[in-house]
Amino acid sequence: MAKDIFDKPKSGGKSISEVRRTSAVGKVFIYIGLIFWAFINLFPVYWMFTFSLKSNKEIFGENVAGLPKEWLFSNYSSAMRTGSMAKYFLNSTIVAVATILITLIAAIMATYALTRFKWKGRKLLNSIFMLGLTIPIHASLVPIYVILKNINMLNTYWSLILPYSAFSLAMAILISSGFMSEIPKDLDEAAYIDGCGVWGTFIRIIVPLMKPAVATVGIYTFLQCWNELMFANVFINDSAYKTLPVGIQALSGQFTTDWGPIGAALVVATFPTLFVYLFLSGKIQESFIAGAVKG
Amino acid sequence: MKNTFGNKVNIFLFLLPALVLFFGILIAPVILSGYYSFFSWDGMKPIAEAENLGFGNYKELFSSTEGVNAIGFVKAMGNSLLLALLSVFIQLPMSLGLALMLGRGIKGERAFLSIYFMPVLISTVVIGQLWLKIYNPSYGILNVALRGMGLDSLAKTWLGKKETALAACFVPILWQYVGYHMLLMYAGVKSVPTELREAAMLDGATDGQINRFIVIPYIKPILKVSVIFAVTGSLKSFDLIYVLTNGGPFHSTEVPSTLMINMLFLRNRYGMGSAIAVILILTCFAFSLIINAIFKQED
């Protein structure tokens, strides 16, 4: 269901339902409403971009909402250097990439076993995995924290990568199952007869055909861990390993009265997501719909 | 491919990474949380030496409501339920309205959709920090705008006053997630078969009637998902509240999650923190079941 929503041809013959019978006045009201809400959505983000380039003098009175009169790129260099945003950005990237890789590998392998092999208990195991969709991360915070503390793993990348992967797994399996069921079984049977073996079939046939699933799962997992605060806040207090959300919290304490660098930090943390969204908005929206509608 | 001996071994090997992650990091800790919740434990000494309180932590959570050192769990739960109510009765209708307007096929549909969904992608910490600035009593854009319109009396320390803090926390939550629910509902509206709409139109139904009698009943499964997400999301809310107020002023915006973190790091009460986590999970499950039942009954 999720996939065909955005693929409909844009032009072509209009069906009856697309012929508007709403009065012109009604239409104007609808547009006013839509534009108003779009403005409410965009304005804070616009404001964030502009104050990241302003001095306090402009932000605090001279020029509250306009474009910066003097473009202060030094805000960015203070956020990156004094505020260690460059470090946090790198940490977030490392954690996100590793989480995505682990989640994908574990999920696609498990999906293969769950959908392509016939064995007792696979339905049961699948529903147990799906329980993961409903378990909030709060549920495991205390034990994971205690265990990490006891084995001296707090303040490491792994202390975030492993829990993030575990919590992304259920959704990843759900999405992968949808995509894998669309790959015809004849394909892997043919490959198997040709002597590919189970693993050969998996690596040469299934994995390459799972590219759309990889994109969807990747996007979903990326956003989950790029933005996660609770675990990151509890498990990491060494600034060498802080991710962006925790780092921004630290930075805002450091620059309480100097708004420009804080704005710059917010932009740095947001920019990659919005930049990707600009090009892949349809794909990103699909991955959210796939996650919710199938769940 | 069916009867090879390697089959079972292979199945196990394919499942292994997922099993380790899932049972090691998700299921086992959940069970441990339940176990910890029966102890008075500071997290330092081995749990075997901690005092077993039975349901003591749970009793204390519901009875410790008065006084300076009270835990105030009931109040926190009440706050999160209030957020849930606001989400269901303010946020979701807004999302539905937008989804219905966009779903009919309007010029610029995709652009509007993409703009409305954008806040969902921004980190909640960023949104929290941004709204801290918006709410700033002296220089925040909200008070500046109010003063600019001559409404000086309305300018407030939004997050610093007991009366306004919770509402002020709700606004960014609303702002961020309207687009999320709108997207789900929009997908539903778009999946309504055109024949259904056309048949109703030929019968002379107005747009309002079509929405009321065709589209909304058709997308009920999605509405259910949205209600469940909105309610459980509110019960679990943490990020924005932590950034905006961290439960203050005077615990007026405390929610179970912020309380749980306080139990761990301010009071070293790991057993109590676990008890809060357990209640939170059970409440989320209970509400999912109740909402499912309500939607079933409606059919």
Image (spheres, coloured by chain):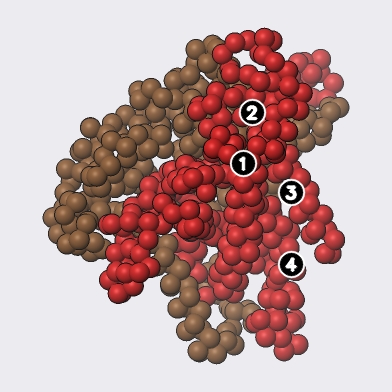
Chain colours: A brown, B red
The residue where tag 4 is placed is: B218
Q: Is residue A149 above or below residue B262?
A: above
Q: Are marks 1 and 3 in contact (CB under 8 Å)?
A: no
Q: Which numbered circle lies on residue B287?
A: 3
What chain is tagged by disc 3? B
Give whichever of discs 3 and 4 has the lower sequence position: 4
The residue where tag 2 is placed is: B272
- Looking at the image, is mark 1 or mark 3 nearer the viewer? 1
Image quadrant in which the C terminus of chain B is located: bottom right
- Residue B201: horizontal and vertical position, in percent? 70, 84
What chain is tagged by disc 4? B
Q: CA distance from mark 2 to mark 1?
A: 17 Å
Residue A161 versus residue A280: which sits nearer the camera?
Answer: A161
Residue type marked 3: Phe
Q: Is residue B132 above or below residue A46?
A: above
Which secondary structure lies at badge 4? helix
Q: Label 4: few (<14), some or many (≥20) within 10 Å? A: some
What chain is tagged by disc 2? B
Residue type marked 4: Tyr
Q: Is residue A85 visible?
A: yes
The residue where tag 1 is placed is: B66
